Amino acid sequence: MARAKKKPTKTKRKKSTKKRKPFQPIQWVKRWLFRAVVACLVFFALGIVGYAFINPPTTPYIIAEKMRLGDVDRQWVDLEEVSPVMARSVVAAEDANFCRHWGFDMGAIRTAIEDGGGRGASTLSQQVVKNTFLWHGRSWLRKALEAILTPAIELVWTKRRIIEVYLNVAEFDEGVFGVEAAARHYFGVGPDELTPVQAGRLAALLPNPKERSAARPSPFVRKRAQSIVEGAATIRADGRSDCFED
């Protein structure tokens, strides 16, 4: 007698019982902060490497001033087309040891600390970082970014490139950026025609170009410009301009 076939029993599939992890806001914030920091570092790294070869089309501060004023005067000019005395003048005015440091002038910093912080110790390299990549104004975040980016600029760019970018992004009057626009604005000449006195007056406007004038120099600007003219001659004679001279 044939045995009756047993019907296969259906096995019940167990439903997935994976528990979702509870939302952890602190971990979420940490994760996105980390991503934001990495993104910023990549952005700055690309900018530093790129601007070693490509001329910066604009800067955050120039964009802000253009929005405020409606327009700005700026035209890029290669360092070869600028009177050599102009480069020496800004170095003499802002950072006489430019060729001898790696981005920070430790001697100037110590002197500033001893004087109670009443005088600045910012190098041209630091100013290039601030003017090209960051924003103006005092904040710990900006100073921290400046401290991180300055050695990178010194590592990737030549000293000559730092001077070239500086001369093209520095503000010389309200809405007037770069030495080409400044030379025409104040003296009606090209940057290659600047005399030592004119170069000294332009350098004397820094770091307060909105409050000083090279066309109608105050006694302070005249005195400072004369000191810069002498300083530019000195750094040429003692070799402190060798790193950016042809």
Image: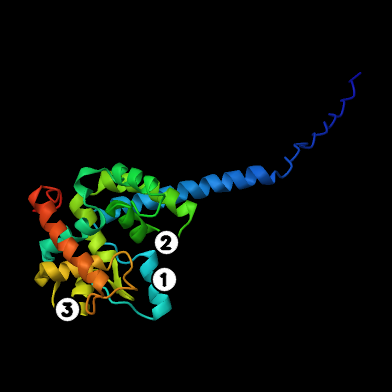
Residue sitting at the far top: 1
* Sequence-earlier tag: 2 or 3: 2
- 22 sits left or right of 39 in the view: right
Element class at badge 1: helix
Q: Is residue 172 above or below residue 109?
A: below
Secondary structure of the residue carrying tag 3 is: helix
Front-lying residue, 82 or 215: 215
Q: Quadrant of residue 198?
A: bottom left
In the structure shown, which secondary structural element does the residue marked by tag 2 occupy? loop
Asked whether the residues under the numbered discs 1 and 2 touch, taking CB atoms below 8 Å apart as contact, a structural biologist would say yes
Residue designated by label 1: 64
Q: Position of residue 95 (x, y in %)?
A: 25, 53
Which residue is at a point 45% across and 51% down the rendered structure image? Answer: 40
Q: Position of residue 85 (x, y in %)?
A: 12, 62
Residue 171: image x %, image y %?
A: 30, 69
The amino acid on which the numbered mark 1 sits, given as a three-letter code, is: Ala
On the rendered image, what quadrant is the N terminus found in? Answer: top right
Q: Is residue 103 above or below residue 6?
A: below
Residue at mark 1 to residue at mark 3: CA–CA distance = 26 Å
Name the front one of labels 1 and 3.
3
| Residue ID for mark 2 | 135
- Type of amino acid at the residue the image marks with label 2: Trp
How far is disc 1 from disc 2 in space, using C-alphas?
Answer: 9 Å
Label 1 crowding class (10 Å Cα cut-off): few <14, some 14-19, many 20+? Answer: few
**Which residue is label 3 attached to?**
187
Q: Amino acid at mark 3?
A: Phe
